[in-house]
Image: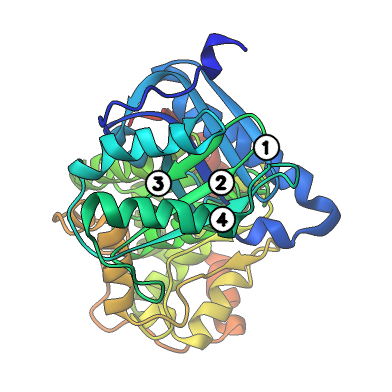
Amino acid sequence: MNEIFEKNVCSGNVDAVRDCIVHYGELALKGRNQGLFRRALVENIRQVFHEIGPCHINLLPGRIWIAFKMPVGRKELSHRLSHVTGVSWFAPTVRLEPNLDALKACLREILPTLTPGSFAVRAKRGEEHFPLSGQTVNEQIGGFIKEWTDWKVDLENPDRTFSIELLIEHIFLHWEKERGIGGLPSGTGGTVLTLLSGGIDSPVAAFRLIRRGCKSIFLHFHSSPFTNAASQEKVWELAEILGRFQGGGELVSVPFGALQQEIIAKTPERFRVLFYRRFMFRIAEAIAKQKGALGLVTGESLGQVASQTLKNLSVIESVQDLPVLRPLIGMDKQEIVDEARRMGTYDISIRPHEDCCSFMLPKSPSTGAGSATLEILEKELDIERMVQEGVSKAQILPVQVRF
């Protein structure tokens, strides 16, 4: 057998991981398309580990086995796999010779390193020709652990579960599972374009679509040089965090200040934000079509600000044809904040900045303008030229993955 598949020497060093079992959840329901999703997941796992050394990724029924040529630190393993969408849970695993003597010898090394508590043993035959049943292994290994440690057996609510998978060529043993982020593998849901503002909401919206398998192109409108560069710096940091969940990407940066000035000069103040948003959507759609994106993603939540009333959302999106995906539409602010904290974007998002919509904000924005009214007022603007100007001045920056 190739050295990359050399079985573990069970030394009690639980931080040096040579093997890992990955389980997926929703993928198992995909029927005849399951192969496509599993191949995408395997490739995404390969990508997050490629820079730290060779690994073999093996498809087993209902799960994936990763074998590393060189040991990987436990924290490094956890950090990287926690950014792979489609992973339901994963467990650093010890791979042993297929006999109970090897299993018991390994447990003698491992058990002194673990915190005492109640336990259960869950063994199953991964291949039907393994000579011992799962129940036999449960009884023998459970008795061995109890004799060796005097820990209490608790089959209902144990402090620790020793999971054992019995295969003809080897035995897998693990005792600590970590939850993944679930969802679907990146790249299986098509490409979307996300309007990324630098605030709390839009990164969460982007993440929710990435978690459903979409690859996101990030689009940021800024008012530089009329405002400082803080929003651009924040968005770059946010794009890097989000890029880890999808293998990188692109950040499209569009200067919007000059177009805002033109809108201010030719339209009533109370409709100003609606005109800003309508032009953003027009420009976003043009860039999305250039990039092959199939929809626009925003962080809008119903009623959160004046432009996000149901009527205003309708008149804003009426200027373009691509579907607008609003994954946060029914969430309240605290729910969004909690998710931003879990993602690691919250502390960046709350740093002060001047965004392009707060720039020259009207004192009393309209909460319910009609499309007909806005269309009449927009006749004062050269829409086609302004959209083309926004598209032509867009700067495209590659988002690299850095763990």
Tell me, what colour scheme is on the image?
Answer: rainbow
Q: Name the residue carrying label 4.
A: 136
Does residue 382 appear in this view?
A: no
- Out of 39 and 326, give the one closest to the viewer: 39
Q: Mark 3 and mark 2: span between their CA atoms?
A: 23 Å
Residue 114, percent from left and from top: 21, 48
Q: Name the residue carrying label 1.
A: 59
Give the mark, 1 or 4, whose residue is nearer the N terminus: 1
**From the viewer's perspective, is the residue at label 1 or at label 4 nearer?**
4
Q: Name the residue carrying label 2.
A: 165
Give the mark, 3 or 4, whose residue is nearer the N terminus: 3
- Judged from the image, the secondary structure of the residue bearing numbered disc 2 is strand
Mark 2 is surrounded, within 10 Å at the Cα level, by few (under 14), some (14 to 19) or many (20 or more) other residues, namely some
- Judged from the image, the secondary structure of the residue bearing numbered disc 1 is strand
Does residue 105 appear in this view?
A: yes
- Residue 245 left/right relative to 133: left
Give the mark, 2 or 4, whose residue is nearer the N terminus: 4
Mark 3 is surrounded, within 10 Å at the Cα level, by few (under 14), some (14 to 19) or many (20 or more) other residues, namely many
Q: Residue at the spot x=62%, y=83% of the render?
A: 372
Q: Is residue 235 above or below residue 367?
A: above
Residue 289, percent from left and from top: 68, 46
Q: Are marks 1 and 4 in contact (CB under 8 Å)?
A: no
Residue 44, percent from left and from top: 56, 35
- Judged from the image, the secondary structure of the residue bearing numbered disc 4 is helix
Give the mark, 1 or 3, whose residue is nearer the N terminus: 1
Q: Mark 1 and mark 4: span between their CA atoms?
A: 27 Å
Q: Amino acid at mark 4?
A: Thr
Q: Mark 1 and mark 3: span between their CA atoms?
A: 19 Å
Which quadrant holds residue 332? bottom left
